[in-house]
Image (spheres, rainbow, N blue to C red):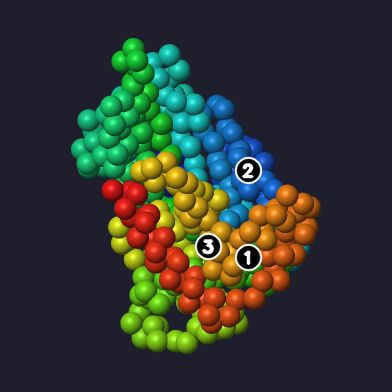
Amino acid sequence: MKQSDLIALIGLPSNDPKLIAFFEKYQLGKIPKTITTNQGTKSVLYKPLNLSFWFKYDIKNERFQPPVSPTGDNYKFLPYLKSVMFNHVDDTVKTPDPKPKDFWDLIPHPRESYQKVADLMGQPAEKMDTQTTFQMTIGADTLLTVQYNQDNKGTLKSSTWVSIIEQSEIVSAVFFDPKYQQEDFPFKRRAYSAIIKWLYNKGWLLLQEQEYGQQLNSEAALLDFIGMKLKGHLWANQIADIKYLRSFLYTICSNRSIRDKHGNKISFYIRDIVLECMGKKNEFDILYKGPFEHIDLFLNELIFDDQIYEKIAANLTARYEIFNLLQA
């Protein structure tokens, strides 16, 4: 078994004959047939060579989207081999990695060959006082990582893994898919759509020039646009690289407040922004003390019209300016 053999398996679904045959040949363990939404990931540990195999069904990479539910129940999904840890336990002098040296056919043995690894992989992707990380892209969407750490006694340890490159998710696809109607999803679908409408009108979505100019004046038109042009989700790589914009979007999609220089809390949560624009914030705060089902019903019945979208857009612009000032 070689390092390159394992890298060649990355991205294969758990039912792929090549993957199954490889696991059987080396008796690596049982491959998971499905993964549920509650589980998210599953791993297979092979102790004799200090390897672990990590399977995931919802990989934030367009090649693996949307997730596949073999039975159509949208609960059990087909997993893919998302990553392999070449050192499940860090390689140190006291706990040396058990692999034979000829396993390392792509890069040298990391702990024994720091300089060789550095020469091969180039400048560190990240360097801190006691930690140095090297990364190398293999193919279109696979990333090999070697990480060195030094403890307070000066002992060097290394960890190496290969993984599918994933994008950072801002808004999940489940909120834009009408088949999901849990709790306050209808409200969140409209609120997140309003954020995307704001980004679209600002020209901050990474689209072709001809894709701008559409009239997104209804919920149906917005959802169609999100499904067709954004593939049903909002990821960081779909947003223009504008200072603090991605941080702002992460913040407004989570229930967060930030204090200004006077110590006053400012809410950036999109739910609060929408409620303020609709003049419903005080009513909601009173209702919030009661049963949650009443809260969800209240939010889901709120109507988003052109005037509300305009108010939300103006509020988002103002909040973004405040956010930028607070980051400075």
Residue closest to the eye, 314 or 60: 314
Q: Which mark is residue 280?
A: 1
Q: Position of residue 117 (x, y in %)?
A: 27, 35
Q: Position of residue 155 (x, y in %)?
A: 34, 16
Looking at the rendered structure, the kind of residue marked 3 is: Ile
Q: Secondary structure at mark 1?
A: loop
When the figure is inspected, residue 6 is found, relative to residue 303, above or below; the finding is: above
Q: For the residues carrying marks 1 and 3, which lies nearer the camera in this image? A: 1
Q: Is residue 87 visible?
A: yes
- Identify the residue at horizontal 61%, vertical 46% (top origin): 41
Residue closest to the eye, 201 or 19: 201
Q: Which mark is residue 42?
A: 2
Which badge, 1 or 3, is on the more N-terminal residue? 3
1 and 2 marks in contact (CB < 8 Å) = no
Which badge, 1 or 2, is on the more N-terminal residue? 2
Label 1: few (<14), some (14–19) or many (≥20) C-alpha neighbours in 10 Å: some
Tell me how far mark 2 sits from mark 3, CA to CA. 38 Å
Q: Which mark is residue 113?
A: none
